[in-house]
Image (tube, rainbow, N blue to C red):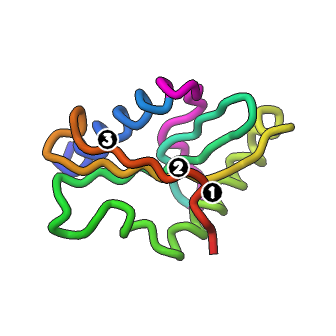
């Protein structure tokens, strides 16, 4: 596995732990369809949340959230709708939203974690 893939996987692990600590249940990791991949899908009693996780060792190439541009947000929404269509029973009665988690630091286990709730889709 490439170094960047290991970094990404470690970041997703940290994000999943963080969200579980907040009371969410992890429903899916690295869910794929023709349109792309969702890093995490989590839920609580009120919401089903598609989570995009971006992990960076530093900000030399920009903040992790800068990688989630308008085009990416539209794609995430399409992926969220595709996931929801396959899991109607899970989504029923809950709000569907997109969050982003950015991790910045040399090691994901103790990197700075930022959580954007309900990312705006253009």
Whether tag 2 and tag 1 are in contact, CB under 8 A, the answer is yes
Task: Give me the C-alpha separation between circle 2 and circle 3.
Answer: 14 Å
Q: From the viewer's perspective, tell me whether residue 64 is left or right of residue 83.
A: left
Which numbered circle lies on residue 11?
A: 3
Q: Residue at x 57, y 24 (%)?
A: 23
Q: Residue at x 17, y 57 (%)?
A: 58
Q: Residues within 10 Å of mark 2 (few under 14, many from 20)?
A: many
Q: Residue at x 37, y 39 (%)?
A: 12
Which numbered circle lies on residue 79?
A: 1
Q: Which residues are magenta?
A: 20-35
x%, y% of residue 35?
58, 62
Q: Secondary structure at mark 1?
A: helix
Q: Residue at x 82, y 33 (%)?
A: 89
Q: Which residue is mark 2?
A: 38
Q: Secondary structure at mark 3?
A: helix
x%, y% of residue 16?
44, 32
x%, y% of residue 40?
51, 41
Nearer-N-terminus badge (2/1):
2
């Amino acid at each position: 596995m490439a170094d960047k893939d290991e970094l990404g996987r470690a970041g997703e692990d940290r994000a999943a732990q963080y969200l579980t600590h907040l009371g969410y249940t992890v429903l899916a990791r690295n869910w794929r369809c023709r349109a792309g991949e969702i890093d995490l899908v989590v839920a609580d009693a009120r919401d089903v949340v598609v989570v995009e996780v971006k992990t960076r060792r530093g900000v030399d190439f920009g903040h992790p959230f800068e990688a989630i541009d308008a085009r990416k947000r539209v794609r995430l929404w399409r992926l969220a709708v595709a996931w929801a269509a396959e899991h109607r029973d899970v989504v029923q009665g809950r709000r569907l939203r997109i969050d982003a988690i950015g991790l910045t630091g040399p090691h994901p286990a103790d990197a700075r974690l930022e959580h954007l709730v309900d990312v705006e889709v253009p």
